[in-house]
Image (cartoon, rainbow, N blue to C red):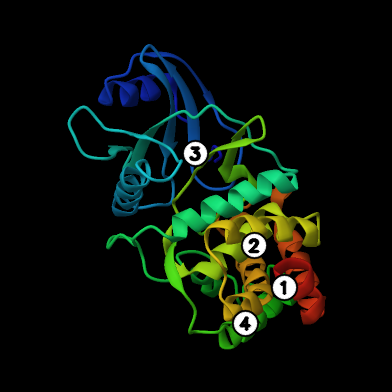
Amino acid sequence: MAVYTQLQENEIRKIGADYGLTIVDFAPIEAGASNSNYLLHTQQGDYVLTFFGDKTLAHANKLGQLLLLAEHEFPTTRLLHPVKGGLTTMHKGKAVMLKAHIVGEMYQDLDEAMLRQIGAMMARLHQLPVPDFVPNGLSSGWQCLPDIVDQNVDPEYEAWIAKRLAELARRLPRELSRGLIHGDIFYDNVLFVGKKLAAIIDLEEATSYYKVFDLGMGIVGSCCGKSTVVLAKARALVDGYQQIRALEGKEKRALQLFIEYAATIVSCWRFWKYHIDTPIAEKADKHRQMMHIAKDIRSIPRARFLDAVCA
């Protein structure tokens, strides 16, 4: 979550009225790296307003459908419906969604007990039926590549990302278990009350894809230091996952590669986002963290990785 579009008080009050809410106070939510979000304090309760700056109405409605599915079986955000019906409204030609505010905290430094809870909840998600309205395949990362290559913003990086993504795509195993995945389980998409998991939020990248990719992305998003994967933390996430769903042998053997793939995709997206789509000087080097993580996980001997994380 972040604020890329500044909404004025009269705009927020109008949007609130579309949902039957009387605004008492509001504040921007300064976190994450995608849509603009505001916390609304209303007479009816607390809600999060999401303004989809770069997502279509169709995409927002699909997310709304997914939230309706998930709220019965998966701890995530509850959607609020507009007064006139539907799942979203429009403002300035962009989709708007309101969700009930979940009390909880984000922890950047997650301990092993917390990671086991995340892993177990990921496995629960992977066991849900795949809705027919979610995309099939990855919905982020790769599509940024054409806008990056040969731009000469950073020629060395542009050459590296194009070569590495192509090589990884060729090496990915194909005969692996697929299902409904979150696609973006970073630490700031998980809420805890104390040390108990309260919700996994922001299902925008949910898709039908390899389950082991989701686990790899979860490790990238919640088990890394500044430039390395913390293997003990990765082990905790995997252990929690396997309490609910045992990984197949070929998934275990593929996990290291999918961690590298996930980090490389995130690096690609960050470079595109902060250098080309929405240049932000203070975030100009964020892609390098993921590049270093991708290189770090690749450098670990396979036997050592399997013994440390999957044994």
* Crowding near the residue tagged with mark 3, few <14, some 14–19, many ≥20 C-alpha atoms within 10 Å: many
Q: Which mark is residue 157?
A: 1
Pick whichever of labels 2 and 1 is earlier in the sequence: 1
Which mark's residue is nearer the viewer, 2 or 4?
4
Q: Quarter-wise, where is residue 236 in the image?
A: bottom right
Residue at 78% x, 73% y is 307
Question: How far is disc 3 from disc 4 in space, using C-alphas?
Answer: 32 Å
Q: Are marks 3 and 1 in contact (CB under 8 Å)?
A: no
Q: Amino acid at mark 2?
A: Phe
**Residue neighbourhood size for the residue with mark 2, other residues' Cα within 10 Å, grouped as few (<14), some (14–19), many (≥20):** many
User: Mark 2 sits on what residue?
Assistant: 271
Amino acid type, label 1: Tyr
Name the residue beneath numbered marker 3: 36
**Element at label 2:** helix
Judged from the image, the secondary structure of the residue bearing numbered disc 4 is helix
Residue situated in front as seen by the camera: 290 or 127:
127
Residue 242: x and y in percent read 59, 61
Q: Residue 265 location, x and y as percent?
A: 60, 68
